[in-house]
Image: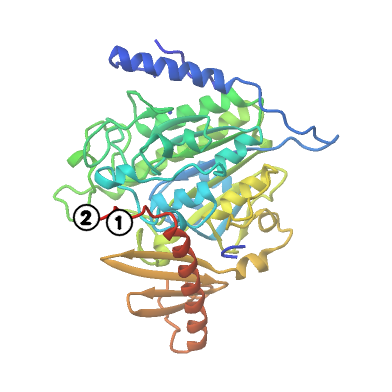
């Protein structure tokens, strides 16, 4: 048997492995390497001045396709999220935090600290055809790599969705340890991926077969990583695939319909809100298990825990009071919960209305770890906003941008301060989000100058990100 894992500006992871001998051998080698790697002494750090606190551990928890109003502390009444709500009681809750409208672009922005349009990952990657050749190349300045360089043990447990080739892998980006899947969604019980039905459960680049509900496997590996690294600074990203389709609740093992294909309200046997709620609540219990592990190892007070989601909710979600859902630029497609807990450093039970966006997580994590933020990163360190020490006004007024450009949907949006301009096809819609969070009252006719100003900012941003993206496109094949 393989060894068990160690309990271990817009500018400005084997309990029931049965693999062929060759694959088993490969897994043994990888597991041994992981065991050795995760118990190596941390790279030397500069000696801290007397009295200076140790750098914090950082646990970043992402759920998938969960609605803004699907969390108790964000208004949910039919979902019990006691662990996530505890984070809100003991930390800071942001009301105006944003992601991209789909999962790949949000995850790309998190890892790179920059707008996803610059790296040609503006849409979710598929699991067949040309998508298998696309992904996020390692740059040397990915978030996990920067933390690893600073002496952090780094791990991703759960969903990656940033490429299938080895050069696009989590390990290539600086994660010491990866357990999870590469595609956008998998069957929660068989762990096969969407369109082609191939197994997609991996551990450090080697295929593995483990029995169990995917949410539980993610939680278990996350806890093992904490147990094995509590004596050194660590960065752990826990990327749950709940509550992304297939809508398979815990305790009801069955292969998902159509090999985990999308379930819509028009299906003959559509999923139910009750199934969806059960998935969220199970993930919340996983969050509680992770928090308990931090406490058991005595590191909870020096751990920054961040909870958020990758995009707006799906059709079974509750996005209220926002309008619309995932894969639109209406607030229901891009505004997400975001909670930060760091006992003794951040206030408890606080709420902040300053807008934030995914790249801000990158900058904030690096700042908390005392790692220099690269000059070309586009996020803002939110710690001053979270602590209440200042910078809220400047952060509130910087413009934030989004774009969907597909044959079936053309949307662009910019938010600056309380104002949001949404360009939906040929329509220019202006909303005051402080008074109209549901985007029902279009003010474009009364503020035409502001519409022109915001549209100019949006056009300049598009020109800039597209110019950089053009340098990354492969050269056309020579004609014969």
Q: Secondary structure at mark 2?
A: loop
Residue 265: mark in rendering: 2
Q: Secondary structure at mark 1?
A: loop
Q: Quadrant of the C terminus?
A: bottom left
Q: Nearer the viewer, residue 392 or 352?
A: 392
Q: Nearer the viewer, residue 7 or 39?
A: 39
Which of the 4 image quarters holds residue 214? top left
Q: Residue at x 35, y 41 (%)?
A: 278
Residue 275 drawn at (x, y percent) = 30, 44
Say if mark 2 contacts mark 1, CB within 8 Å: yes
Residue 309 drawn at (x, y percent) = 46, 50
Residue 176: mark in rendering: none
Residue 315: mark in rendering: 1
Q: Quadrant of the N terminus?
A: top left
First in sequence: mark 2 vs mark 1? 2
Q: Nearer the viewer, residue 209 or 298?
A: 209
Which of the 4 image quarters holds residue 234? top right
Gap in Å between the C-alphas at discs 2 and 1?
8 Å
Left or right: 454 as drawn, with respect to 58: left
Q: Residues within 10 Å of mark 2 (few under 14, many from 20)?
A: few
Q: Relative to 436, does residue 345 appear above or below in the rendering? A: above
Residue 172 drawn at (x, y percent) = 48, 35
Q: Residue furthest right?
A: 50
Left or right: 418 as drawn, with respect to 166: right
């Amino acid at each position: 048997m393989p060894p068990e894992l160690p309990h271990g500006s817009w500018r400005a992871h084997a309990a029931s492995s049965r693999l062929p001998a060759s694959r088993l051998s490969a897994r043994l080698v990888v597991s041994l390497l992981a065991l050795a790697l995760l118990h190596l002494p941390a790279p030397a750090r500069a000696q801290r001045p007397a009295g200076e606190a140790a750098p914090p551990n950082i646990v970043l928890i992402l759920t998938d396709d969960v609605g803004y109003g699907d969390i108790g502390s964000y208004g949910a009444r039919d979902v019990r999220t006691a662990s996530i709500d505890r984070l809100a009681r003991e930390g800071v809750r942001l009301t105006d935090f944003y992601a991209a409208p789909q999962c790949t672009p949000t995850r790309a922005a998190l890892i790179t600290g920059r707008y996803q349009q610059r790296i040609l990952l503006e849409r979710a990657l598929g699991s067949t055809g040309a998508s298998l050749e696309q992904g996020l190349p390692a740059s040397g300045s990915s978030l996990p790599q920067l933390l690893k360089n600073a002496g952090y043990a780094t791990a991703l447990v759960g969903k990656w969705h940033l490429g299938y080739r080895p050069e696009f892998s989590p390990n290539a980006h600086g994660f010491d340890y990866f357990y999870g899947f590469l595609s956008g969604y998998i069957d929660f019980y068989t762990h096969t991926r969407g369109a082609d039905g191939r197994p997609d459960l991996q551990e450090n680049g080697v295929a593995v077969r483990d029995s169990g509900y995917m949410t539980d496997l993610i939680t278990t590996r996350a806890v093992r990583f904490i147990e094995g690294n509590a004596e050194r600074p660590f960065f752990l990203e826990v990327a749950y695939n709940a509550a992304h389709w297939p809508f398979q609740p815990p305790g009801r093992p069955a292969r998902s319909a159509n090999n985990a294909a999308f379930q819509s309200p028009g299906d003959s046997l559509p999923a139910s809100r009750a199934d969806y709620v059960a998935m969220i609540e199970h993930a919340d219990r996983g969050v509680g298990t992770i928090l308990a592990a931090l406490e058991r190892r005595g590191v909870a007070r020096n751990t920054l825990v961040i909870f958020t989601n990758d995009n707006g909710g799906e059709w079974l979600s509750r996005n209220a009071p926002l309008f619309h859902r995932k894969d639109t630029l209406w607030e229901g497609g891009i505004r997400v919960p975001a909670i930060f807990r760091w006992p003794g450093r951040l206030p408890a039970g606080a709420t902040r209305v300053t807008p934030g966006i995914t790249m801000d997580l990158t900058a904030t994590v690096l700042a908390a770890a005392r790692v220099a933020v690269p000059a070309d990163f586009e996020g803002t360190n939110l710690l001053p906003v979270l602590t209440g020490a200042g910078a809220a006004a400047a952060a509130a007024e910087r413009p934030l941008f989004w774009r969907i450009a597909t044959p079936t949907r053309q949307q662009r949006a910019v938010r600056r301060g309380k104002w949001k301009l949404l360009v939906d096809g040929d329509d220019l819609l202006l909303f005051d989000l402080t008074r109209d969070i549901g985007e029902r009252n279009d003010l474009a006719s009364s503020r035409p100058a502001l519409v022109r100003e915001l549209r100019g900012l949006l056009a300049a941003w598009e020109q800039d990100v597209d110019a950089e993206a053009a340098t990354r496109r492969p050269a056309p094949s020579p004609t014969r």
